[in-house]
Amino acid sequence: MELVIANAKHIIHAQSISTCIGESAKMRGTGIARRSPEYISKKMETGNAVIALEDNEFAGFCYIEIWGHGKYVAHSGLIVSPKHRGKGLAMQIKQKVFDLSKDKFPDAKIFGITTGKAVMRINFELGYRPVSFSELTDDPEFWKGCQTCKNYDVLTRTERTMCLCTGMLHDAKH
């Protein structure tokens, strides 16, 4: 298994990653924001993503987003292909993207939102703690990313104070 910071040569996997995210959302019946192959490709081109490959085939992926002028970094799009699940790959990917975030944005608070029990466990093991949404970025562009989630109406009805997702924050300063 190869686990690397993604770059332009990995764009050939963007469609597979996008499809896998969409299929996972359907299968789990939970809110997962969809990401287009073009969006995923941009993350690869800027070195803000981690990809796992086995025999040059996509096995897993996660990317980082920068919000609030570098005050916040979010980890998003964590996905492992079905045939590679249950082997600890998600934790390895998350650790690598976490380290990448700390290297590139050492002063930023790192956060994520998820409905997935496995991701919550991984985040907890990395030192995240559950927080209210008010402790996350107030950057409206971040919240636009939630529009493709089936639970977006919950978020908008509560004026971004609650959702079915759990907000988790890692703040090295606390």
Image (cartoon, rainbow, N blue to C red):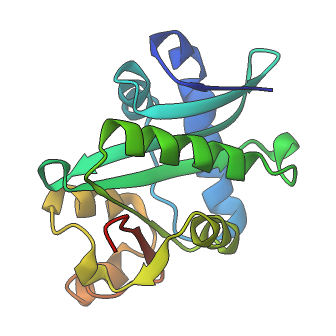
Image coordinates for residue 58, horizontal then vertical, percent: 70, 27
Image quarter of the N terminus = top right
**Where residue 33 sits in the image (x, y, percent)?**
45, 57
Quarter where residue 120 is shown: bottom right
| Image side of residue 134 versus residue 154, left or right | left
From what the image shows, is residue 80 above or below residue 147? above
Q: Nearer the viewer, residue 148 or 11?
A: 11
Q: Quadrant of residue 142?
A: bottom left
Q: Nearer the viewer, residue 37 or 136?
A: 136
Q: Which is more toward the observer, 171 or 136?
A: 171
What percent of the width, then of the height, locates residue 5?
53, 26
Q: Residue furthest top?
A: 9
Residue occupying the point 55% across, 33% down: 50
Could you tell me which residue is drawn at 76 percent across and 45 percent down?
A: 89
* In this view, 67 is above or below 64: below
How many numbered marks appear? 0
Tell me if residue 87 comes above or below residue 116 in the rendering: above
Which residue occupies 39% across, 38% down? 103
Q: Quadrant of the C terminus?
A: bottom left
Residue 21 in percent (x, y) is at: 59, 47
Residue located 66% across and 50% down the image: 23
Q: In this rendered view, identify the residue nearer to me: 10 or 98.
A: 98
Q: Answer left or right for 158 relative to 34.
A: left
